[in-house]
Image (tube, rainbow, N blue to C red):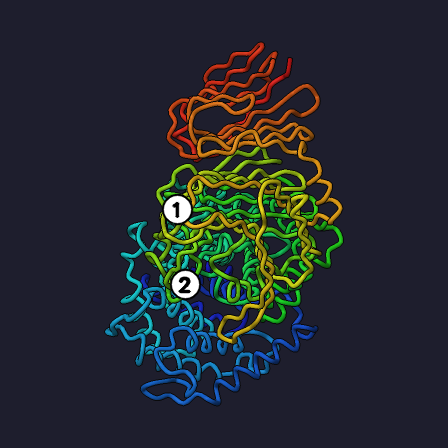
Amino acid sequence: MKRHSRRLFLQLSGVAAAGVLISAYAAHPGERAALAEEDSFAPLRRRWQDVTAGSGFDATAEPYRARLAETGTAAAGHRDAMAPTETSLWPDLAFPSYIATPRRLQAMAHAYVLPGTGLTGDAGLAEAVAAGIDHYRRQVYAADAEPVGNWWHWQIGVPRRLLDAAVSIGPHLTDPQRDALRDAVDHFVPECLLDDYSGTSTAANRVDLCVVTLLRAMLTSDARKAALAASALSPVFPYVCEGDGFYRDGSFVQHTYIPYQGTYGVSLLSGLATLFAVLRGSPWEITDPNRQIVCDMVERSFAPVVHDGFCMDLVSGRGIAREAYGDHARGRAIASAILLLGEAASADERARWQSMVKGWARRNTCKPMLKAAEKSGDLGFHARLAAVLGDDTIPAADEPAGHRLLAMSARAVHRRPGWCAGLSMASHRIGHYEHGNGENLRGWHTGSGMLYWWAEGHGDQYSDSFWATVDPYRLPGTTVSTRRLADGAGAGWGETCPPGRWVGGATDGVYATAGQHLNGFESTMEAFKSWFFLDDAVVCLGAGITGRDGVPVETVVDNRRTDALLTVDDGEGWAHLAGHGGYVLPCARLSTLREERAGGPDQVTRSYVTLWLDHGVDPDSADYVYLLMPGASPAETRARAADPGWAHVLVNTARQQGVRVPSLGITAVNFWNDGAAGDLTVSAPCTVLVREIGDGTATLTVSDPRRDLSELTVAWERPVTEVLHGHPLLRDTTTGARLTLAFGGLADGDGDSKTVTVRLG
């Protein structure tokens, strides 16, 4: 006993400390265990507050001093305006107020724990928060209440904010108040939700449920709940082959059918970064070796869909229609999560991620990231980002050139110096669009081959009220029936998958071909669409365009939110949009429209220039060919139109679509069926990209977009002396005057590209 007393006495000085020590060791063993558990939770609560409320800044320095003062002023106002009744806690927020009331209580609690608010540690404020939590619990979130509306409010949104506020104010919540909140949370978030990894307990939702469970553990120092919160994360980490989660190619899907790095994905990444940080060094530290997959996905899944600091809308589901500049807000959220996750990553990963985020922040001149972080009040992210930006030893990474094909989510991203493009498609496994909770009711055609693109200075092209004002029947790149559709047409939550299976493509990491067997949304329209992504252009082909809806079918070459000068030369087959880029249309007459369009709750007005090809009413095997040249000048566009040999269209039918670009050594063909095109012959539907490097070697990249081939033979009518680098699925090769490659087991893959390198004869 004396040995223990001496050791702890060195840690705790004074008579009072000694008294606590003696009583602790004189207590019943069960009481000693409870005290030990409490000791484990104290640092957890502090770390939670540091991570979520904000830390790492000087509260006396700007901009923190001013922001903290504003936080305190707002909290005081909320405290003084609190007027509990059976129908509200504040007169301006009538119950149930699932989001606003808990958020206000959470903000007040943060003013209590943050330094420099003028209310730091203020008992009166904490007691007001405690009373508010208990009032909301009794009137709305009582254990015997009937959960009405969206399940998310009851299991994630409300309990997370109430528990965060409760943990922040600590002892100011009375035992009866704490016990009642505990019982309510246990009722609406029972442990059985974490028993089965299915339904609404997968991917991002599972992470959120684990965050709620950890907060519930911190509320009552419940070690078993903390262990459950940590262990229930394990099903989130492994790669999936279907449904929700991360795929090996970098895809992330939520709601079974929707690519979702931009909203649910960042919620997952932020939640995991928070849990890794809070639990690090605790008895419940997350040690599952598969957690490394999350770190790998920073660069494989999230970085590809962030361009100059904003997150592309093609991976944000119904969230695209919520607010103007939402893509920039989602980009900041991803950057914030990555910097926080870096604290739990390796030194090499942390260095790469800091450099990447610094590059995003430097290039985002449309909505400067540091200023936006300050305005949002996210002081922790602001402090981390400011430190990175101010550290001259951290280089700002450039936008990486190359192509990323996320085949399992029917998405593609192409980057070249000065421009970037993103492609959104629908397939038998990926929905045309998602609507739900009254959001994104007119996103019908976002999966019909929508081609987003950004040249320099276009960071707000799809940000500034685009979705509120654009013509939803004329989204850029799409081929659509103009049949009128009801708001929210089709099943909700992404269950809008067409039957087409051939959706995907092939990439060698630099160039790419992508294709979509398109079945129009709630339409008889069918089309075969291909895109060939090159250095300064995207070659766009369409064939087999057929419809029986009794209305015109159109291919939208582009629809730019601008009032820039449009020049069209039908004689030479080109058009140019000043400050944006050029279009080459060798065999088609372009229709154009300049208009002002209004929309959104505030009826904002934006200018548009629309270019489209009219295939007529109920077309039968219509087709198109055009080149998109982002950032091109009028002279460059005119020169390309005058050089028909720059890109040869080898074939453009419902059986094959392909091009040859001699200056790049590229031959690329999407084979919708077996057959031959140019120098290539294949035994089954597939896609093939050939690139002659110029040093006597060539690469052949092959994929099976349908993911159902047990074997595939590809023949290239070129002399080849040897295969330099094969692929594990390459079963047999024949070289000589003709190259033959025989692959097996492609159906077992995820539609990814298989590259073989050969030496030319």
For label 2, the SS is loop
Left or right of 704 in this view: 633 = right
Q: Position of residue 615 (x, y in %)?
A: 48, 47
- Relative to 200, does residue 295 appear above or below in the rendering? above
Please name whichever residue, 152 or 181, is drawn nearer the observer in this view of the structure. 152
Number of numbered tags placed on the structure image: 2
Q: Quadrant of residue 142?
A: bottom left
Q: Position of residue 111 (x, y in %)?
A: 54, 77
Amino acid type of the residue tagged 1 in the rendering = Gly
Question: For the point 70% across and 73% down, which residue is it?
Answer: 61
Residue 309 seen in the figure? yes
Quarter of the image that includes the C terminus: top right
Q: Residues within 10 Å of mark 1 (few under 14, many from 20)?
A: many
Distance (Cα) linking label 1 and label 2: 24 Å
Residue 335 seen in the figure? no
Q: Position of residue 117 (x, y in %)?
A: 59, 79
Amino acid type of the residue tagged 2 in the rendering = Leu
Quarter of the image that includes the N terminus: bottom left
What residue is shown with label 1? 547
Left or right of 578 in this view: 268 = left
What residue is shown with label 2? 441
* Residue most extreme to the front: 571
For label 1, the SS is loop
Residue mark closest to the camera, 1 vs 2? 1
* Residue most extreme to the top: 736
* Earlier residue among tags 1 and 2: 2
Please name whichever residue, 715 or 346, is drawn nearer the observer in this view of the structure. 715
- Relative to 730, does residue 590 appear above or below in the rendering? below
Please name whichever residue, 512 or 674, is drawn nearer the observer in this view of the structure. 674
